[in-house]
Amino acid sequence: MNAKTTKIIYWTGITLTSLWFGASGFFELTTNKLVWQITQQLGYPAHFIYILGVMKISGVITLLIPNKLLRLKEWVFAGVFFDILFAFFSKLVVLGFPATIDAIVAFVMVSVTYAMFRKLYTATYTVRVSE
């Protein structure tokens, strides 16, 4: 896969991820009735929903800044993966497997996006020797 294709897949994934999690964060912060009902049905308290909303919006902003904050983007991807995993297992236990389809789709989408991120921005690690 050439660099141009990798960038197209990456930015398409970032756009879709930002729309998905940005909308979710917005609905959590504006107390959208449906989002709050489902989240509370899963057993999460109100204060957690607000924190989740703030973190999602912050993460989306970070992801949309091109070629900057690469280490922070790693943390955003980790947070998104945790959010998806918690949503998947919470829905699986409380609502049943059919309710997990959105989490499965999100997991695939974010996994492909992260793989393209790693292809574009290879991690270089150096050992610092203390004197």
Image (cartoon, grey):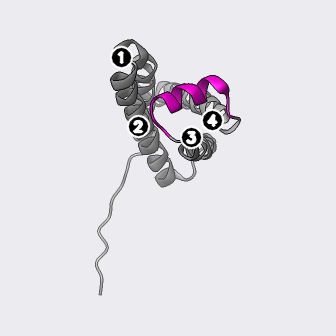
Q: Position of residue 33 (x, y in %)?
A: 66, 26
Of callouts 2 and 4, the N-terminal one: 4
In the image, 121 versus 74, the foreground residue is 74
Disc 2 is placed on an element classified as helix
Whether residue 85 appears in magenta in the rendering, the answer is no
**Residue at the spot 38% in from the left edge and 24% down from the top edge:** 94
Marker disc for residue 81? 2
In the image, 26 versus 114, the foreground residue is 26
Type of amino acid at the residue the image marks with label 2:
Phe
Q: Position of residue 121 (x, y in %)?
A: 44, 44
Q: Is residue 103 above or below residue 48?
A: above
Whether residue 35 appears in magenta in the rendering, the answer is yes
Disc 3 is placed on an element classified as helix
The boundaries of the magenta stretch are 31-44
| Residue 63 visible in the current orientation | no
Q: Which residue is mark 3?
A: 49
Q: Which residue is mark 1?
A: 96
Mark 3 and mark 4: span between their CA atoms? 6 Å
Is 41 positioned to the left or the right of 91 in the image?
Answer: right
Is mark 3 in CB contact (under 8 Å) with mark 4?
yes
Mark 1 and mark 2: span between their CA atoms? 20 Å
Marker disc for residue 28? 4
Of callouts 1 and 2, the N-terminal one: 2
Mark 1 and mark 3: span between their CA atoms? 21 Å
